[in-house]
Amino acid sequence: MALAGRTAMRWARLRSPWPAAVPLRLPPCLPAGPVACERLYSSSGKEKLDMSMYPVESIRNFSIIAHVDHGKSTLADRLLEITGTIAKTDCNKQVLDKLQVERERGITVKAQSASLFYSHEGVNYLLNLIDTPGHVDFSYEVSRSLSACQGVILVVDANEGIQAQTVANFYLAFEAQLAIIPVINKIDLKNADPERAEKQIEKLFDIPIDECVRISAKQGTNVEKVLQKVIEKIPPPHCNTADPLKALVFDSTFDHYRDYAPCFLLPSVTFYGMEYPFGQFGSAVLSSGENSRNTDNAKKHVHIMPILFRYAGQVGYLIAGMKEVTEAQIGDTLFLYKQPVEPLPGFKSAKPMVFAGMYPVDQTEYNNLKSALERLTLNDSSVTVHRDSSLALGAGWRLGFLGLLHMEVFNQRLEQEYNMSVILTAPTVPYKAILSSAKLIKEYGKAEITIINPAQFPDKLSVSEYLEPTVLGTIVTPHEYIGKIIALCQDRRAVQKDMLYIDEHRVMLKYLFPLNEIVVDFYDALKSLSSGYASFDYEDAGYQAADLIKMDILLNGNPVEELATIIHNDKAYATGKFLCERLKDAIPRQLFEIAIQAAIGKKIIARETLKAYRKNVVAKCYGGDITRRMKLLKRQAEGKKLMRKIGNVEVPRDAFIRVLKRQTDK
């Protein structure tokens, strides 16, 4: 049975609540059916893989999860080498980290998948691997990856032991009822203490010590034992070949350089439910020294090879002729036309924790920026986008991110991948207000509103109560830093909930934080106080009542909309003084004096003055009457007064984040 023509398939939108099915048309440039596929690829001269060799029982889908810098990507490199997926060379460092921002920052920000072919005890296995990020701001990538897996490799650094994100990732896998393989990495380090790491795993996660695998991913020690554990402990996917075809979209990307399907959506799909010769193209990963137009040209990167069929439980991608990137969403279910199925569970929608306005530097670039945002949010579905406008900055968007690092990485990817320069406003968190004014309740249609833009902050007279978001933070630190960290948490209005000694050296603290107190620079301050040894993770904890006010920043009496912020009343004066001082350092001096003020309503609570450049107009006067000197100085003062009236003060684009960080730049 083959797919017939352009009307062969439909997408069922699988988000909560599920909208109606959206029709999908196959690209007209691609012939339908497996026979056409055979003709298309037989002339290429490339070897085709027989995927029928890998029944459901021989497939393992798993993710690698860990805290930041515990060796996930290095372990993925060794697994790729051992299975022959890539050649063994000294250049294989973080092979799956393909984004420029990942290379520059040395962290994984996007979950990457690869298929490995491995023979164990005479049986051929297909291992589908997903390398996940370790930072809390990219936890949505981890939860999304776990939805497509039946097991995980939990990596713990033998030198650092269990960290905050290790705990968070473990419970994500535990709640998803996945098989967990604990791996102690970096045993080759001089100060490694694998016994301590194993005891921490047993105490916190109730996993027996004898189930832990000690490895050195950098040197390749015992890595093959990890593959054997994957085959033995992780179950195959749950599939019923008698059911109609059903596929889960767990990732998607936008490729400009597909020579046979240019600029089409490429959703990666996991096929469940039916052993059916799918009439489009799957993807397999193989070792190749040749340059490929389908993927990165660097030889050290994993290359994609088209293959003919996809069978139950396998992973592949589909090239669809979609004109709008929003037609296929992460979590959608793919099924055959006229063969409707029960939708797969999909993914829980990401909840934005930080909002910021984004505007083009030049309004003529609005459409180009809109197109770039659509394509980039296709690849990063945790970002929410709402249209917004500003009197000062023009048309733009209000974007929701999972954290400040997530926001910075997204902005960096816009610049590097799409060559777009943008203005980002100061980040803010989503507050709520309980309205008491009947007029406003009628205007909004409800008594409780969410405020994501300080410009929408309602007046205190029309509000009965303000609410601020809170998070439950987990801090893991060596015990000698407890005093400093407790003082830091109290300064951020946090309430202690729990304190647990993991072992004789490390302590786990739990605090209830107001989100706006940690979103900008808390992580930097924590690392500074603990000499880099403490780790931090947080999860949503709802809303609580708070005394909130809106504070404006004025430059020469003109409000800077990008720096308007909502803060707690107790910290208004200190925050206003701090912002004025940082702005004084961030704004370049002008030929006229600049007054930097923080205001609540019409009340000025802090001020700094940026002195003007001053030309020595009396340098040419030597001796003579004093009235000549006074005349020149008076004329200069009048000129500067006029210039101050008509001069514009431009705030550098990078100042909006820099001025909010409480730690001074070293």
Image: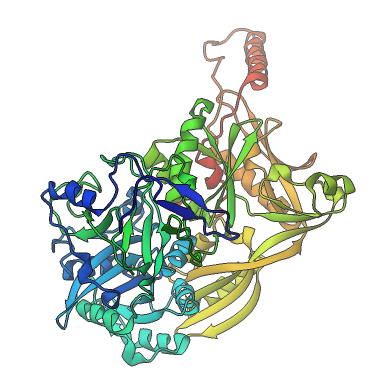
Q: Is residue 360 left or right of residue 390?
A: left
Residue 222 place in picture, x, y as percent: 21, 80
Q: Residue at x 63, y 42 (%)?
A: 563
Residue 347: x and y in percent read: 50, 64
In the displayed structure image, the side of residue 108 where residue 597 appears, left or right: right
Name the foreground residue: 193 vs 152.
Answer: 152
Q: Which of 216/629 is in front?
A: 216
Q: Which image quarter: residue 170?
A: bottom left
Specify the color scheme: rainbow
Residue 215 in sight in this render: no
The residue under the point 14% across, 50% down is 42
Determine which quarter of the picture holds residue 413: top left
Depicted 576 relative to depicted 135: above or below: above
Above or below, 524 against 484 in this view is above
Q: Nearer the viewer, residue 18 or 292?
A: 18
Residue, far left = 45
Percent position of residue 477, x then y: 48, 76
Q: How many marks?
A: 0
* Quarter that holds the N terminus: bottom left
Above or below 451: residue 611:
above
Q: Would residue 242 be visible to someone looking at this image?
A: yes
Location of residue 433 in the rendering, given as x and y in whole percent from the top left corner = 77, 55
